Each structure stands twice: as C-alpha cells, then as structure tokens.
Amino acid sequence: MDPADALALLMSPAGRIDPYPTYERLRAHGPVVQAGPVFYAVTGHAEADAILRDARFGVMDDSLRDQFMPGWRESQAVLSISRSMLRTNPPDHSRMRRLAAGAFSPRRIAAMRGVVEAQADELVDAMLAAGRDGTPVDFMAAFAYPLPVGVICALLGVPAADRSLFRRWATDLTGVLEPEITMDELAVADRGAGELRAYVTELVAARRRAPADDLTTALVQAHDSGGERLSGDELLANLIVLLVAGFETTTNLLGNGLVTLLDHPRAAAALREHPEFAPGCTDELLRYDSPVQLTSRMSTAPSRHGGVDLPAESWVIVMLGAANRDPRRHPEPARFDPWRPQVHPLSFGAGPHYCLGAALARLEAQVAFPLLLRRLPELAVAGTPERRARLTLRGYATLPVSVGREAAPVTVPGTPPGAAGRTP
C-alpha cells in the first residue's frame, strides 16, 4: 500500500477506530513519507520530536487557511480555534501562552492534588451507588468526563452547576480538529462553538462585575489593561480552548487507560498495591494508546527530516500515536509494559506548542487509576465499549463497567475508632 492509499485508509471510519495497523503501513515507507505534492506524514519518534521543535515549522495561519479552507471565517468553530494560542504562531502565541501559564505552574498543579483526590473519591462513591445492584455504569459519563471537567472549571471559575453543559459543546466543537470534516460535521461544530462562545461571553461579564481568584479573571484583567496584552477575540478564543482542551485530552486518557489496565491484570495489581508506581505507568499509558493521535504543521523554509527534503510551504501531519510506537525508540512498541524504562511519549506534543495542561492531566491520571483500582478491586468492562470515530482526539463515547463490591477501608494501626480512611 502506497502512502497516499494508507492515508486514505487512515481517514476512513475503520482507520480512525483502530489506526495502529495503518501507521505500520506508513512506517514501512520510512519515518517521513511524501503522500502528495506538498503533503507529508511523519511516523518516526525522533523526526516528530525534531519537527515539533523546529522553528521553521508552525501552525496554519490566516493566509494558509485562506488557501486551504476558503470561507473559513464563516465558521464559528474554525474562527474561535484560530484566534487561540492553539492555532497561532510566535510572537502572538508566546504572548498568549505567558498570560495563562501561571495557572499551570508546578506549584499550582501540586497544590491541586487534594482537590483532585476529593473529586475522584466522590465520583467513585457515585459509581458504587449507581452500580450496587449489578447495573453497568458508563465510566465515561460517571468518571472520565466529570473529573477533568470539574478540575478545569475550578481553575477557570466556572460554577459547579454549569459543568454538565460542557460535554456536548466540547464533543461538537472538537470535530473541527479532525484532519477531515464534512459540512454536516462542521455545522455541528459551529453550533457547539456558538453556544460555548455565548456562555464564555457571560462568564467574562460576570468576572468584570465580580473578580475572583481564577484564570478567567486573570485573562479578563489582561484584556482590560489595554495595550497589546490580549484582544477581545483572543480572550474569548483562549477561554474556549482552555475549557475544551482542558478536559477532552484527560477524559480520553482516563478511558483509554482504564481499558488498557483492565486488559493487563498484572499491571493493574501492581498499581493497586503501589500507587507510587503511577507516574511511570501513566507515561506508558500515554505512549501505548495516546489520547491525541496527530497534529499538523506548515513549513516556512526548506528543511530535511528523516532523509526527506521538505520544501517551504509543506503541510506535515505529525502522527503522535505512530511516533509513540516507533520501535527505534520503544522496542516491542505494541506491547504495554508499565515497567518500560525511559518512556518518552509525544502525546502532549513538544516545542512551543507543548500542551499547557500536560502536568495537570498527568496528575489527574496518577490520582485516578490507583484510587479506582484500590476502591473497586472487581472493576471490569461490562459489555462492548464504543469508540468515537475520531483520529485527532482518540477515546471512547461509552465505556460500560461493572463496579462490583468496594474494598474494605484500610485501617492504620493506632488509628482512633471511626477514623479509618480509604487511603493508606
């Protein structure tokens, strides 16, 4: 199969559901392959990492959108994403990213561990109540969505009562991140963008009336301070992207990761008994089944990667999911091995556009998986999970599980009666 045919297969519904066999067909042609006159695909780990860090490559700007997507300004979804840090290049990207970076500092992330633990415990309580009679529980709806959306909404200052609104909006809007989208799918994305933009506009107005200690207030004040800090369109676009990207990736990490762990009982047992094992296990879960499978870049100058000359104005699809399974970087890449040394997943990208919330997503996974496995030792998939037919954001639409019986609370010797906790 030549590269163009392989890419066509990858974009098909079947290819999106399970892209890994197609990645290997592409990889057989080399780590960087030409699939069209100015179109290239990257499956190599070293090459993907280098291109994402190479200043000669950037995201698609307005002039290129005009060339490849005529009429894009008529789409609320495309327009919203295009004005955010996700779809801008330096110096605008650097300016916008600096304004939001303080909320994701190592100190702020570490301070959120207690909040994440408390929210995860409450969600497990609710799962137990819903599944006590043996009724399957949808893990995506009951845990994988509400945990990260609760965390990012707390950061942004979104009222708890409004959090349930965001799942459909995000599902609709993120369709525009796919490498191909139909007009019907674009209409759905535009609907989600419009509703989300209206909500964010009201949130901004509320923070102007009553500032709070949250990221929304900080960005509103950056805009209102004047100068060149943040335009009105940038303010709304970045709040939209932070809300959506702030939980979509983590939701997929939790769903993909749970299925993988339940398929590998030895790894699950080790994580249940040794929660300190979670950081390395999370990185391997990210590598093995990445929640983000690809990103794209446009070249501004000629370069050479993977033995292939890339002319200026080349369009490059960087296949993060394929790069994570490059055997030159990770031997036996199709094998899940949480004891694998020197795991370096590219799931959150690299270079200037490295995911701002990567540390927060990792923290949520490192808290969630040991807690789920410890409190729910009989947790199992119950029925057939449904994959979303998407490639960029890979995850489950539904994931039915049986929760079984809760583990007995852990009693620490010397603990006063009634003070036994769930966490040793």
Image (cartoon, helix red, strand yellow):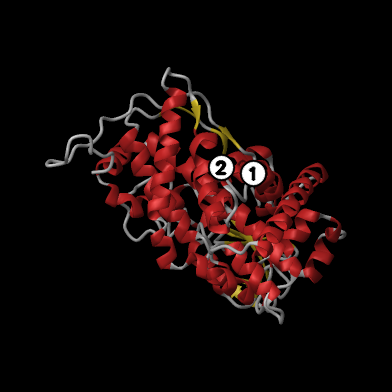
| Among the 4 quarters of the image, the one containing residue 156 | bottom right
Disc tally is 2
In this orientation, which residue lies closer to the viewer: 274 or 336?
274
Residue underneath mark 2: 395
Whichever of labels 1 and 2 marks the residue nearer the N terminus, that label is 1
- Residue 121 higher or lower than 203, as above or below: above
Q: In this orientation, which residue lies closer to the viewer: 117 or 3?
A: 117
Q: Which residue occupies 60% across, 39% down?
A: 17
How many C-alpha atoms fall within 10 Å of the one at disc 2: few (<14), some, or many (≥20)? many
Of 317 and 349, nearer the camera is 349
- Classify the position of the C terminus by image quarter: top left
Instruction: Specify few, some or many for label 1: CA neighbours under 10 Å numbering under 14, 14-19, or 20 or more.
Output: many
CA gap, disc 1 and disc 2? 8 Å
| Mark 1, residue position | 390
| Residue 62 visible in the current orientation | yes
Can you see residue 307? no
Residue 227 lies, with reference to residue 150, above or below; the image says below
Residue kind at label 1, given as amino acid type: Arg
Q: Is residue 286 left or right of residue 18?
A: left
Q: Position of residue 80 (x, y in %)?
A: 74, 59
Q: Is residue 279 above or below residue 251?
A: below
* Circle 2 SS class: loop
Q: Secondary structure at mark 1?
A: loop
Q: Nearer the viewer, residue 76 or 202?
A: 202
- Residue found farthest to the front: 209
Please state if 243 lies on the left or on the right of 404 as rendered: right
Residue 67 locus on image (x, y percent): 83, 66
On the picture, is 137 further left or further right than 211? Answer: left
Q: Tell me if label 1 and label 2 are in contact, CB under 8 Å.
A: yes
Determine the residue positioned at 84% across, 66% down: 66
